[in-house]
Each structure stands twice: as C-alpha cells, then as structure tokens.
Image (tube, rainbow, N blue to C red):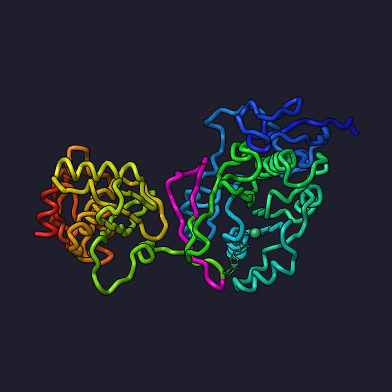
Amino acid sequence: MAKTKTTFFCQNCGAQHSKWMGKCPQCNKWNTIVEEVVHKEVVQTWDSSQSSSGKKSKPFRVSEIVSNQEKRFNTRNEELDRVLGGGIVPGSLILLGGEPGIGKSTLMLQLALSVSHLKTLYVSGEESLNQIKMRAERIDISNENLFILAETKTQSIFNQIKALTPELLIIDSIQTLQTEMIESSPGSVSQIRECTAELLRYAKESSTPVILIGHITKDGNLAGPKILEHMVDVVLQFEGDRNHLFRILRAHKNRFGSTQELGIYEMHGSGLREVKNPSEILISQRDDELSGNAIAATMEGARPMMIEIQALVSSAVYGTPQRSTTGYDIKRLNMLLAVLEKRAGFRLAAKDVFLNVTGGIKVDDPAIDLAVVASILSSNEDISISSKVCFAAEVGLAGEIRPINRVEQRITEAEKLGFQVIFISKYNKINIEKYKIKVVLVSKMEDMFQRLFG
Ligand code: TYD
Ligand code: MG
C-alpha cells in the first residue's frame, strides 16, 4: 500500500493544487477547492493483459489501421441513432447528462431492453433491482440478453464484466461509482475522474461501448469537473421542461458525428415515445386563426421542421417599450424591429413586443427571420395569417429578404405537411415549377406585406 496523500481539487474545473486557496487560479471560481485523500497505486483495475483483445500499443500506419466505421451498432431507436451520428461506435465512451427526473434512466433502460441483439449489462448504483424491474415492466419490452447489476464498486463491476463479457455497458450513474484506489467519497472530483478513466481504459481495450449517465448541477453543467467532458467521446444532453410532454436529446460533443442533430421524445406512461415528425407537436392545433401567429420552415441539423412563432404587439404602457422573447435571440428581435422601422416605415418604437417560439425549443436558424417579421406585422395590423402559409428566409439590415441554405428541403417538408403557400427569397435560385405548393418569391419587406395583407 502506497502512502496516503492528499490533494486539493477544484470541484468546478478539476484542477489539482498543492494547497487550499479561496479562488481557483485555473477557472477563477471562488470556494470550489476541496481536499481529497488520494491513493496512488500502480495496479490498474482494468488490466490490458486480461482483456480479450489484449493489444499491446505500438505505432501503426494510418493505412494499416482497420477502420470499424461500418460496424456501428444500431440502437433500434432512430432518434438516438441520429443524434449519435448513425449508431454506437464500438469502444466509444458516451456521457448522457440531464436534470434529475428528466428520464435518463428510462431512456437508457429502454435502449437496453430494445437492443436484444447485443448482450447488455446495465449497472445501477441508484436504484435497487426491484425498482428497475418495476420500470422495465412499465416499458414492457422483454429482453433475455439484458443483465442488471446493482453495484457501485468498480472492482466488483469489472469482475462481473470479465465473467459476462457484455457487448454494451450502461452505468447509472457515474457519480455513484467508487474505486478502491481513491479514498474520497463517491461523487467527488477524484472519484469521478478515476472511475471514468477506468471505464475509458476498459472501453478502448475491449472495444465495448460504454454509456455513462451523469447528473447535472443547478446551473446546468455536468456535475463533476469539466475534465469528464474531455475524456469521453460523446456528450449527450437530455433536456426539456419537466412540465412539457416532450424531451430533447442533443449532442454537445461528438467525435463520430455532427452536433447539430436533435432527437425528440415524448414521455408516456409506458416510457419514452420517439417523435418522428416533430412538426406535429411544434405547431399548435387551432381551429380559428389568430393574428400574430406565423409558421417558419426551419432546420435542426439535417432535419426540416416547422415551428410556430407567436408575436404580441401592443401600445407600451410605460415610457420605455418592453421587448421580450422566449426561444429567440432578443438582440435579433431588436434588429428586426429597427429594420421594420427604418426600412419599411412601420411605427413600432412605442410598442411593446413579445415573441414566443412555441414548444419551448430554442432556435438559432436565421431562416426564421421572415416568420418573425410576419408574426409581428400580423399582430400589429391585427390581421391573421392563414395556417396554410409558412415562411423561410433571412432578413438583412437593409430590409432585403435574403436566400437561405437547403431551401428545397424546407419546401418539400412544407408541401408534405399540407401547407399551401411558402414565402422564400427571390434570390434563392430554384425551380419553383416542380412543386405543388405555391412558392412566393419576395425580395423586400414591402413585397411580402403586399402579398400577405394586400
Ligand atoms: P427517470 O428516468 O428516473 O429520470 P432520471 O433518471 O433522469 O432521474 O424518470 C423520469 C420520470 O419519468 C419519472 O418522474 C417518472 C416518469 N416516467 C413516466 O412518466 N413513464 C414511464 O414509463 C417511466 C418509466 C417513468
Ligand atoms: Mg435516474
């Protein structure tokens, strides 16, 4: 046994210091440094000589390396596959973060139950076998290839892994794990770091994908040091208002795919349902047409999606008019209002403007500008826009309506969803003859106003 040593860790960034300080010099946060007891032993829990592949590391030519790109595991969950960039890459370490109660354990158990083609080990340090059984009964999928282990000590977990040789390992959660090599309590920076390092070694040397569930703190960061995010290959975030029915899965980091993609789920009594057509939940179902509503054809990653913009324009009660937004950049709103005022002569300076992107989704696609402008004008004039009309264009500082990328994909989506008219920029050079939907080309704000409200 090596001699006991203590080190000071910053709980925020994971930096190591030799003495206590009030402020971490690395990340400049106050009161984040804590003392932890560390054991330094040379023995590694996951010993490569015992792993099935037992590769010794030596340099290879790039051409000699056998790519396992094609061997991605399909998770039988389209939304998850898309966010991961087309399935799980063997040997990858994936971190899934999210607030308590958002559905991380449900998503992972559902995944574990669906992948009956892979021998899966689900390790839970948070729930008892009984609780997991109850959850599995709610989800109601049976899988003889899934094994559940309630354990928190990494040494015991690795012993079970050696006996079982799973093809997929899920850990719920990394904060509950404990390695004997370090004496501090579970959830502390050094424990999280060491346990993750052990799992990383295991994943890489055995080519088994490992998914870690991680908690996030009050301010929305993954609990434990930032260093965790550097160690893993993929960081997924499961988010959404707990009162909303649906949940959004995003990749914040992905070494094997884009971070643009987004997966949408709905929480039901029997687990999470994939929402394959997001427009169905993002457009409010209404019978009567109200002023101030306009629909934008936007893109999230490679997927076109229709979202609804709602604006409310009213005379300001106080001297300074209020501007507020949900799901949209307020600076961009102010810019569009200035453009409307200066370039198109609409008097909005003395008006309160509230803007809402329905569904609680945050969008930063410039192509929704035109829908934002249309909804503001509709509310200002108190004339409704038909729910069969949608918009896809950017608005420039000179009041010009600018072309956007992938306009054809957006038009096709709008057509598929039964829209009858779409407004796009005149400068988008496309052949509009081939569409059934009426494509209206506009170049200036006045053009659009004329075509919309006559
Ligand atoms: P959970 O997956 O435990 O969240 P996390 O692991 O992120 O903390 O549970 C999320 C919530 O989902 C919980 O409050 C109960 C609810 N739930 C359902 O509505 N339907 C279901 O089928 C299941 C399993 C859970
Ligand atoms: Mg959980």
Count the marks.
Answer: 0
Inspect this view and state whether residue 302 appears: no
- In the rendered image, the quadrant that contains the C terminus is bottom left
Q: Position of residue 101 (x, y in %)?
A: 60, 61
* Quarter where residue 91 is shown: top right
Q: Going 78% across and 30% down the picture, which residue do you hit? A: 7
68 relative to 126, above or below:
above
Q: Quadrant of the N terminus?
A: top right
**Residue sitting nearer the eye, 8 or 38:** 8
Residue at 75% over, 52% down: 161
Name the side, left or right, on which 371 lies relative to 40: left
Q: Is residue 317 magenta?
A: no
Instruction: Give the percent coordinates (x, y) of residue 14.
Output: 67, 34
Is 97 left, or right, of 16 in this rendering? Answer: left
> Is residue 301 something that shows in the picture?
yes
Rendered-image quarter of ligand 2? bottom right
Q: Is residue 372 left or right of residue 24?
A: left
Give x and y (percent) for residue 180: 83, 43
* Most foreground residue, 328 or 272: 328
Q: Nearer the viewer, residue 318 or 33?
A: 318
Q: Is residue 251 magenta?
A: yes
Task: Judge whether 102 appears above or below 210 on screen.
Answer: below
Please tell me which residue lies in front, 57 or 143: 143
Q: Position of residue 356 (x, y in %)?
A: 35, 56
Residue extent of the magenta highlight: 249-270
Residue in the image at 29% along x and 43% along y: 334
Q: Give the residue at x 81% y 47%.
A: 155
Query: Outermost residue toward the right?
Result: 1
